[in-house]
Every structure is written in C-alpha cells, then in structure tokens.
Image (cartoon, rainbow, N blue to C red):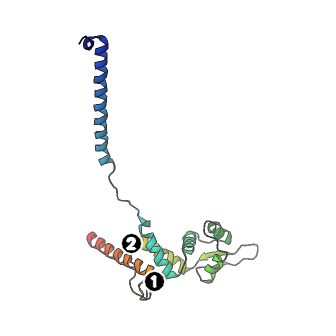
Amino acid sequence: MEFEFSKAGIAWRKKQERKKKQKQERISRRKKVKAENIVRYRRVEPILDYMKYWRIVRQWAKVRYQLSQEDLDILFFLYSEQYFDKTKFAEFEQVLPWDKKRFKSLLEREWIHVWRKSGGGHKALYELTIKARSCITTLYKKLNGEDFPISETANPMFRKNASYTDKVYRKYMLNLRKESQQLRRLSR
C-alpha cells in the first residue's frame, strides 16, 4: 500500500491516466474523421461525361462507315486540322499500329482529298472530305446524347443478318434510346 502513495506510484498513476486520456482522444478523433468522411466524399455528378458511351458509338461508326478504329482515331486527329500534309499525317500515325497503306486507303475511299497539288516548290496539302467531317460531327452528336437510328437502312447493326456482336450493341443502343427519351420527358 505504501507504493501507491510514493512519488514513483503517483508518477506511474499519472502516466497511466495520461495514456488512458490519449487513447480516448484517439478514439474520439477517429469517430470525428469517420463522420467528416461521410460529408467529404459525396458523389458529384460529372459536368462533362462524353466518353461514357464511346465504345458503343465507336462500334456503330465502325459498322456504319466501314472504318477501323485506327482510321477513326486519325480522322479525329485531322478533324481539327484545316489543311495537312503527309508529314502531319505521319506524325500522328506513329502512335497507331503500323499500316503502310493507311494514307493511300483513306485517299482512295474518299475520306481525305487533295486540296493543293504539289509543284512549284510547294508540298501537296490535303483536307478531310465533307463525308469525313460529317462522320466526325455525327460521332460527337452521338457522344452528346443524340439517339441512334433504329431502321435497317440507317443503321446496319439493325439488319437481320447482323453479327452477334452487332446484336449485343444493338440491344444496348435500344436501352440508351429509352433512357434518353425518359430524360427528355423529365426535363419538359
């Protein structure tokens, strides 16, 4: 019993009380942080959500316009370029899988055309055709929420002889169409 009232005993008791108090403070801080986290991590709807349905839009464009993914990528790159030469084309083509005939293929299929022929010390300049510009504009509209056409003539994915992959994407397009129609009704 004498130990409890000695200087060592009093110091030991104070130390134990401090430890207990610190432990309670840590626990209360954890509870406070947990309560703050609930408020801190609220889900905020993104303002721009363009790429959410990019895979569906890309597949639709590949089937509709008979383009590869690389062709679409290069057309998106060239869309902002008014005029370009082969070096500008080759600059972006470096990040794509190697295809020696890509430029010639796009030229022959009329996705790009000659704006100025070479000669007189000038390089040949090219630009996207109206067909290519309208294709990219349509893709941007689809990404912004415009409905996909559901007729067989306007959308090859709705043909009876469509592949299994196209049928899966077609089902998703119909779901997207229903969602967008509901959103339009609610916004009225």
Which quarter shows the C terminus?
bottom left
Look at label 2 and name its amino acid: Gly
Question: Residue 14, how many percent across, how many down?
Answer: 29, 19
**Picture layout, residue 3 above or below residue 138:** above
What residue would you read off at disc 2?
A: 145
Q: Is residue 83 left or right of residue 156?
A: right
Label 1 or label 2, whichever lies nearer to me, is 1
Which of 7/145 is in front?
7
Q: Residue at x 61, y 65 (%)?
A: 95
Point 32% across, 41% down: residue: 33
Classify mark 2: residues with Cα within 10 Å, few (<14), some (14-19) or many (20+).
some
Circle 1 — which element? loop
Residue lying furthest left: 1
The N terminus sits in image quarter: top left
Residue at 28 percent of width and 23 percent of height: 17
- Residue 92: x and y in percent read 62, 67
Residue located at (25% from left, 14% from top)? 4
Q: Earlier in the sequence, mark 1 or mark 2?
A: 2
Q: Say which amino acid is labelled 1.
A: Ser
Q: Regarding mark 2 in the picture, which secondary structure is present there?
A: loop
Identify which residue, 145 or 25, lies in the foreground: 25
Outermost residue to the right: 120
Residue tagged by mark 1? 163
182 vs 62, nearest the viewer: 62
